[in-house]
Amino acid sequence: MNGNRFLWLSINLINPKFKDERVRRAIQYALDVSQIMDGSYSGLAAPATGVVPPGMIGHRDAILYAPDAEKAQALLEEAGVSDLTLELAAMNDKTSQLTCQIVQALLGAIGIAVEIKAVDEGVYWTLGDKNGETWKTLDMVLMGFAGGVDPSENLTWFRPAQIGIYNWSQFDSSEFDALYQQGTNEPDTEKRGAIYKKMQDLMEESGGFVFLTHETFAAVTRGGLKPCILADGYLDVPRFAKGSI
C-alpha cells in the first residue's frame, strides 16, 4: 500500500557551489525521478510531488520543474559552470546506494560529476547536526523521514529553527515559517490545503529540494499473530500478540 515515509534529495543552499540559483535549478531539471522509481523501486513506487503524500490535504498534483535535460544543460552554460564535482552522502543500504548511482548518472549526463559518500546510520545522522563539523559544508544528501498523519508533521522539519538539526538544506524562509503557523491555526480544510501547497512551492522554488517518493509499505503476517502497526506505518514489534487480526 502507499506509505507516508517521504524521500528527497537535499541540496545545501549555503554551500558556495550552489550560490547561483541556475545551478540548483539545473539539478532539479536534470533529475528524472521516474528513472529512480524504475531503477531503485522496480516501478512499485511513484514520484513524489512534495513532502505531503497523496490522499492528504496539501498534496500537490505536480512539481514545478518537470525533468528537462536540455534546460538543465542550458542553465549550466548560462551560469558559466563547468567541471563541477559534487559529493552525495547517503546511508549505505542497497536502495539508497542504487538511488545515488542513478542520480550520479543523470547529473553526469549534463556534465556534473557526483562522488557518492556511503555512511552507516550512526554517522549519517550527525552529518547535518550543528554539533558536528559538516553541516555547513555538505553538498547533497539523500534523505528520508517517516511521515506523520497530518501535513504539518511533514513540513515542520523545514522551518528555519530546524537548520542544523533536520533542515539540512539550510532552507531559511520566514514566509514558509509564517505559513506554517497560519496553516496550523486554519480550521478550513480547503484553505489549509492551499497553504501547505504554497509551502511546498517555496521549498521547490528555493532549489534546495528534489522530491523523490513516498515509499510503498507492505506488512506481512501469519495466522495466530496480531501485529501492531502504528499510524505512521511503523511496526511496533514488542506489542505484537497472539491471536487473529
Image: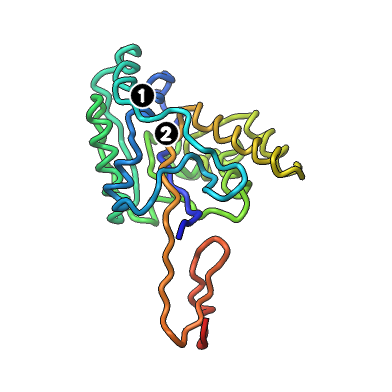
Is residue 129 depicted above or below 237 in this figure? above
Which percent across, then down, holds residue 99? 30, 46
Mark toward the start of the polypeptide (1 vs 2): 2
Is residue 28 depicted above or below 120 in this figure? above
Quadrant location of residue 72?
top left
Q: Secondary structure at mark 1?
A: helix
In the visual, does 238 lie left or right of 37?
right
Give the image's coloring scheme: rainbow
Which percent across, then down, holds residue 7? 43, 47
Count residues near mark 2 (Cα–Cα under 10 Å), then give few for <14, some for 14-19, many for 20+.
many
Where does label 1 land, which residue? 26
Rounded to the nearest whole Å, what is the CA distance between mark 1 and mark 2? 12 Å
Which percent across, then down, holds residue 202? 56, 30
In the visual, does 233 lie left or right of 70?
right
Where does label 2 land, which residue? 11
Which residue shows up at 34% across the image and 20% down it?
71
Count residues near mark 1 (Cα–Cα under 10 Å), then give few for <14, some for 14-19, many for 20+.
many
Is residue 36 depicted above or below 41 in this figure? above
Q: Assign the N terminus to one quadrant of the image.
A: bottom left
The reply to whether the C-beta atoms of the residues labelled 1 and 2 are less than 8 Å apart is: no
Is residue 20 depicted above or below 145 in this figure? above
Which residue shows up at 63% across the image and 52% down it?
150
Residue 58, disc: none
Which percent across, then down, holds residue 74? 31, 16
Q: Secondary structure at mark 2?
A: strand
**Residue type, mark 1 in image:** Ala
**Residue type, mark 2 in image:** Ile
Which residue shows up at 60% across the image and 56% down it?
149
